[in-house]
Amino acid sequence: MSNPDGHKSGGDRDWSVVVEDGLAKSNEPVSSAVADPAATTRRHEPHEPPRQPLPEKLYKAREPVHNKRVRGPYRTFKWLVMLVTLGIYYVTPWIRWDRGPYAPDQAVLVDMANRRFYMFGIEIWPHEFYFVAGLLIMAGIGLFLVTSAVGRAWCGYACPQTVWTDLFQHVDRLIDGDRNARIRLDRAPWTWGKVFRRGFKWTIYALIGFVTGGAWILYFADAPTLFRDFFAGEATPIAYITVAVLTLTTVTLGGFMREQVCIYMCPWPRIQTAMLDEKSLIVTYKDWRGEPRGSVKKSQKEPEKFGDCIDCTQCVQVCPTGIDIREGPQIGCITCALCIDACDKVMADIGRPRGLIDYATLEDCEREANGGKPRSPWRTLLRPRTIAYFLIWGSIGLALLFALGVRSHTGMTVSPHRNPPFMLMSDGSVRNSYTLKLRNMESRPRDMKISMEGLPGAVMWSDTINRNDAAATQIVTVPADQTKTVRAYVVVPEGSPARDFSFRVTSLDEQGETAAVETRFSAPGDS
Amino acid sequence: MANKGTKKRVDEPTGTEFVGHEWDGIEELDTPMPRWWVWTFYLTIIFALGYVIAYPAWPMFEKATEGVLGWSSRGQLAEEIDAADQARISVREQLARTPIERLPDDSGLMQQAVAGGAAAFRVNCVQCHGSGAAGSQELGYPNLNDDDWLWGGDLRAIEYTLVHGIRQAGDDQTRTSQMPPFKGAFDSNQMDALVSHVLSLSGKDRSTPLGAQTFADNCAACHGAGGEGSRELGAPRLNDAIWLRGSSQEAIARQILNPRMGMMPKWEGRLDPVTIKMLAAYVHSLGGGEDFLEVAEDPEVDVDEQP
């Protein structure tokens, strides 16, 4: 605040008006209909000292971020999330899952060649892709849910870009040292020592990228086989191309682009801007407590003139995206909370209460600034918006589970042959032909009975069943996990009229699953 | 509120200049693009240069410039077709080795043959027999879906018909039969009685003694006493529901007085033996195919390797 008396004089301050540069300015929202357009840009809070306008440049060079090492509960949590997410990513393809002799034994497998998707006990066929669509919808609404509950937690902890950037930044620290050493090395001339050091680091980058891309392809084929083939040079070209492309993107995005991805490329921060409101939990700097900033020495001399922020810039130094959280919520803030860890440590060292930078909602901030009691951040979780999102999210999940539970593993499609629509046989009977596709979605061969309903006197045979064996029902063995095409010939006695009837397929096992499809029998005189 | 004049306004909190566009109080900032963006742009230009050199790019009067890689979409198609042909070779070799009556024993090979036959049928046969192989009663092209066969409906017989044709001049093994024209042979009474008798064979009319006598004297030699026809002689069955040239009284009378007889070209020499085999398998699979009955001689001795 540019008005240092405001904070110290207690909670009776009128916050609707702030004084800046000697001018009283409204802090209340002003309708654009009545506002002077220039005033609309001055409602920002907190009010920073005016910055120097940027020198006129068409393009902005990236300012390298050398984030300092930090310890604290949020850092520990970040480690944990990294461990879990990377663990899931690398271990999953190696988990085995017995499905019998007719199906792969990989727990999670996207089998593009055979159009099958396996996930533990669930097998998805292409026509059941709505399950995957449902999962994606759940993921989308899940993001809404998480955002409205805990702000940009996805960005801060679980986003792959965040996890891999974190990993690469740890490599930076391991090879080049902490923040100051890295800044020094960055500025140092290109000596052989620096060349060697950079080469070594970038080799590690490439290795991480390769392992990342290499694990990706294991989801699309039998992992142990592909692993062996890959290094034996016997895998398909697409495997090598995929690994090469993913290695390149991992190194580029995680190794060099880093926060640029969040700031310029990712659409999610933009959507988040619309999703966050004054009730959303964000990482925020409590400016009424911190401002005006002053060193420890200064504030010891004149304690009434300075806030808690000692301007040590620890929060800036540890930030993985290189922002200054004290400027307020911004697109570059991924709410990883490392600045909370850093600031809490400083506050502890100088003997001031923790939480100058903390998880809080803007609403709570305002209440606290006005002298209200701080509320626990957990209280923000339970509010109508989060509950509504949770209910939507949960009901989609339940609906998917229900659909998964009741789905049939037997199916059939029928397409009558229209050219010619019917066939007169030499004994005067009339024949129609149909292409039946029998679906066996179990991982074992099954006998299936095909019968006809509503077509009196009809018998059938097929391309593999001789006409001499024509009968009212036929039994066909459908191979495991496959669709069998049967060309069925149905013949009715002379004089039978055209009519609609149904084919019914029934699996001849203890499941006894059945499916019926209506179709039409054409006869002479049928229009 | 466009920015007229020379005065530049700067957004205080961000220190960024305004573009000058404003919507309901929301203004656009002139945020500079990141530098890597422009490098990406340069990379695309370099890529484009390489592409223009490597691939066909500039349209000229006759054709586009040829890239140094020599790639063309036609060439790629040719390669893909070649690869598909290579993949089919083994199937064709297997088909060439297998006697046609043994095809149904190998259902996988039979499926391949039927699929190949379907493709060949669409090129060579649909002109007369129709895309659904239903033939044409008007024009006398037989329906190949039904179970009525003039010359036999097992795989061997169908293959023979394909190889030698029907009434094909210049092939002494061709299937041939001749129905004599009876124009002037019968008076109108006899004619009506004969037509009624022919229709009575399949229960469509009543026979009279005159008609039965006329049939026995003139027709039974080839068509059989009961109109059961003869495949050896190529005499059609008259006692079934299928009439190649119509079942009306006029149509039958016309066929007796001045018979029309179809002709099918022989395909030997025009199609290779394997394609003919596949065509036979396809026609056999249309629903009316008959089983091959082994005759006394060993069929393997008689296999038509080079028909």
Image (cartoon, rainbow, N blue to C red):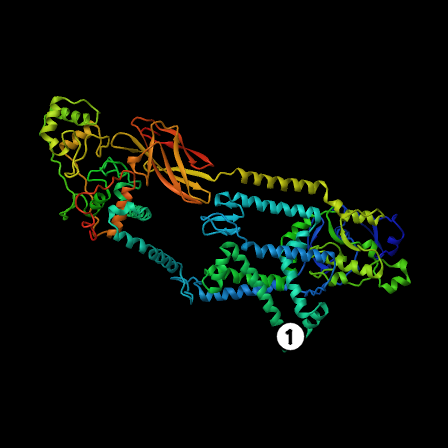
Quarter location, residue A291: bottom right
Q: Position of residue B237 (x, y in %)?
A: 19, 33
Q: Which chain carries label 1?
A: A
Left or right side of A498 for B200: left
Left or right side of A77 for B124: left
Which amino acid does the dot numbered 1 rest on?
A: Lys
Question: Can you say whether B203 is above or below A413 in the image?
Answer: above
Quarter location, residue B189: top left
Mark 1 highlights which residue? A194
Q: Position of residue B246 (x, y in %)?
A: 22, 31
Q: Can residue A261 be seen in this view?
A: no
Quarter location, residue A205: bottom right
Q: Total number of numbered labels?
A: 1
Left or right side of B130 for A334: right
Q: Where is residue B262 in the image (x, y as percent from the top left)?
A: 19, 40
- The one nearer the camera, A285 or B273, is B273
- The one nearer the camera, A418 or A150, is A150
Q: Position of residue A230 (x, y in %)?
A: 48, 62
- The one nearer the camera, B2 or B264, is B264
Residue placed farthest to the bottom in the image?
Answer: A192
Q: Report helix, strand or loop for mark 1.
A: helix
Q: Is residue A373 visible?
A: yes
For disc 1, the neighbor class at 10 Å (few under 14, some 14 to 19, many from 20) is some
Question: Can you say whether A297 is above or below B95 in the image?
Answer: below
